[in-house]
Amino acid sequence: ASLLAWQPAAIITTGFDHTVAARQMLENSRVRVAELMEIDDRPIDIAVGLSHRSAGRQAAHHLVSRGYRRIGYVGHDWTTDRRAHVRYLGLVEGLADHGLSLIAERRIAGQSSTLAGRDTLAALLAQEQAPDAIAFSNDDMAVGGFMHCMGAGLAVPAQIALFGFNGLEIGQALPRPLSTILSNRFLIGKTAVERLLASPE
C-alpha cells in the first residue's frame, strides 16, 4: 500500500506469494507488476523466471541418465520455501518417468544452510538405505553435504553423487564442482526490467 501510494510506473516482486489483500491491491492498480523467479502459476501481469517443477524433473532425468538408480533427497522447510517443494515434486515425477522413486529422504524444519545440509545428509546416510546420489533442495544444502562427505571420507561422485540448485559460485569452487541447475538471477532481473520498459500499459 505504501509503495502504491507513490504511484510507481512498475513494481517488481519475488515469486507469486502474496497475501489476498496485497494481490487485490496489485490487480486493481494501474501499475505494471513483474513477479520474478518462477513461472508455474498465473501472474498478475508478467512473470520472469523458470519452471521449478521442470527443474526438479530435469534433475531426476540427469541423475538417471548418468546411471544413478538409488537416489535420495535432502531438503529444508517447505513452508518458508515453496519453490523448493515444487522442485521436490518435479524430482519425484521425473524419477517416476523412469519407474523409480526416492529410496530415502530427510528434511529439516528450519531454513537452508550449509550446516543444515551437512547434518541432514549425515542423518540420512545413517539410515540403512545407501543412496548412490542425493538431490538437495539447493546449493547451500548441497555444499554442506559435500563437507560431510569430505569429513566422512566419502568420494564425490565416485561413492555418492550430489546435485544442488541455484548455481552458486561456492559450489563451483569445491574440490569437485557441484552438479547443479543455474538460476540466472541477474538475467531474470534484467529481462523483467526490459519487458516492463518495452511494453508500457
Image (cartoon, grey):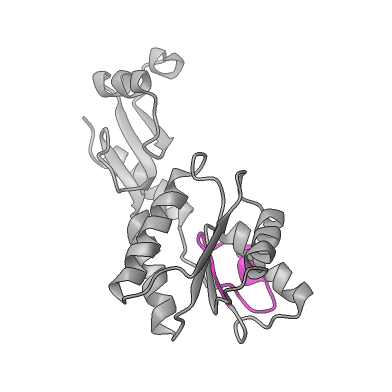
Up/down of 101 relative to 112, above or below? below
Q: Find out whether residue 166 is within the magenta segment.
A: yes
Region of the chain picked out in magenta, as a range = 161-178
Asked where in the image residue 67 lies, by quadrant, the reply is bottom left
Predominant SS along the magenta part: loop
Q: Find out whether residue 59 is within the magenta segment.
A: no
**Where is residue 109 drawn, in percent x and y?**
60, 44
Asked where in the image residue 173 lies, by quadrant, the reply is bottom right
Q: Which of these two is toward me, 60 or 50? A: 60
Question: Quadrant where the N terminus lies?
Answer: top left
| Residue occupying the point 45% across, 58% down | 183
Q: Which of these two is toward me, 139 or 196? A: 139
**Where is residue 127 drawn, in percent x and y?**
63, 68
| Residue occupying the point 67% across, 54% down | 116
Q: Which of these two is toward me, 157 or 186? A: 157
**Where is residue 35 drawn, in percent x and y?**
36, 39
**147 with respect to 71 (left or right):** right
Q: Kindly give the residue lying farthest to the right in the view shown.
A: 151
**Where is residue 57 drawn, in percent x and y?**
35, 65
| Residue occupying the point 61% across, 50% down | 108
Up/down of 108 relative to 146, above or below? above
Asked where in the image residue 158 lies, by quadrant, the reply is bottom right
Up/down of 185 relative to 146, above or below? above
